Image: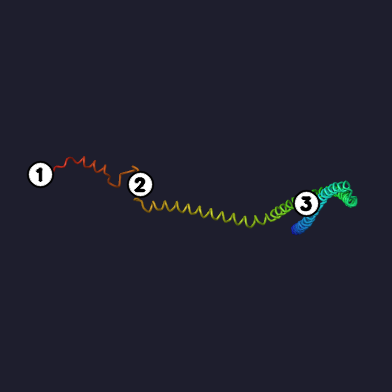
Amino acid sequence: MIDRLISTLKALMNGDRETTWEQAGERNDLALLSAQIRDAGAAVRAARKAVALAKAQNEQDRRRIGTVATAIADLETRAKAALAKGAEPLARDAAEAIAVLEDEHAALSAAVTAFEADIAVLTDNLRRAEARLRELERGQRVANVREHVRTAGTLGAAVRQSSLTDAEDTLIRIRDRQERGMLADEALSSLTALDRPQELVSRLAEAGCGAPVRSSADAVLDRLKSSGPILIAKS
């Protein structure tokens, strides 16, 4: 019998030890998850800034293309005017500038087209990363809540044996004290009636139970009527 009890105690102790290790492991994993999510969040924020900067630079290049195209059109108009006036040297200078601007326009156009494709891929990857980060954050919140609930459940037995039990005992004492107070009031009321029986007799008499204990106007009138007329002596 003793051996069986010892075996049971050892099993319980081992179980508690395994539970403690498991709880410690879960707490460590939650802390690790929190750190990893912070790192992932920082990486996503950095990627978001990088994509925003790339879009801004691409928009600048697009505006530059428009500016170059406007300059080319203006130079062509002026070069034609120079040729019409026979100012061929000026027209050649304009043609050389137009050639340079056209090369820049072509390079910018190609770069913008290629960069837009890259930005589309980067934006899609960023959206996916943001969605995964949100999912991780939701999962972290759920895991934290579950850990708190599990911890509360683990401590529930101890809580029930301490705080809840103490509160229940206090409530019982309060109810017992209130019940004793009510019984004492009732007993005092009955004792008061016995200590002062005249009041009880008066209440009974007023209720028509037995002869009245005090004279009333009606009783006096009845007595006067029954005693006959009163003779007034003449002087």
Q: Which badge, 3 or 2, comes first in the chain's sequence? A: 3
**Relative horizontal placement of residue 67, taking residue 163 as reference (left or right):** right
| Residue at the disc numbered 1 | 234
The amino acid at mark 3 is Leu
Crowd tier of the residue under label 1, counting other residues whose Cα lies within 10 Å: few below 14, some 14–19, many 20 or above: few
Determine the residue positioned at 30% across, 45% down. Answer: 212
Toward the viewer: 167 or 113?
113
State how far apart marks 2 and 1 are (Cα): 47 Å
The amino acid at mark 1 is Lys
Q: Which residue lies furthest to the front in this view?
A: 85
| Residue at the disc numbered 3 | 133
State how far apart marks 1 and 3 are (Cα): 125 Å
The amino acid at mark 2 is Arg
State how far apart marks 3 and 2 are (Cα): 85 Å
Q: Which residue lies furthest to the left in this view?
A: 235
Crowd tier of the residue under label 3, counting other residues whose Cα lies within 10 Å: few below 14, some 14–19, many 20 or above: some
Percent of width and height locating residue 190: 42, 51
Percent of width and height locating residue 56: 79, 52
Toward the viewer: 152 or 122?
122
| Residue at the disc numbered 2 | 203
Asked whether the residues under the numbered discs 3 and 2 touch, taking CB atoms below 8 Å apart as contact, a structural biologist would say no
Crowd tier of the residue under label 2, counting other residues whose Cα lies within 10 Å: few below 14, some 14–19, many 20 or above: some
Foreground: disc 1 or disc 3: 3
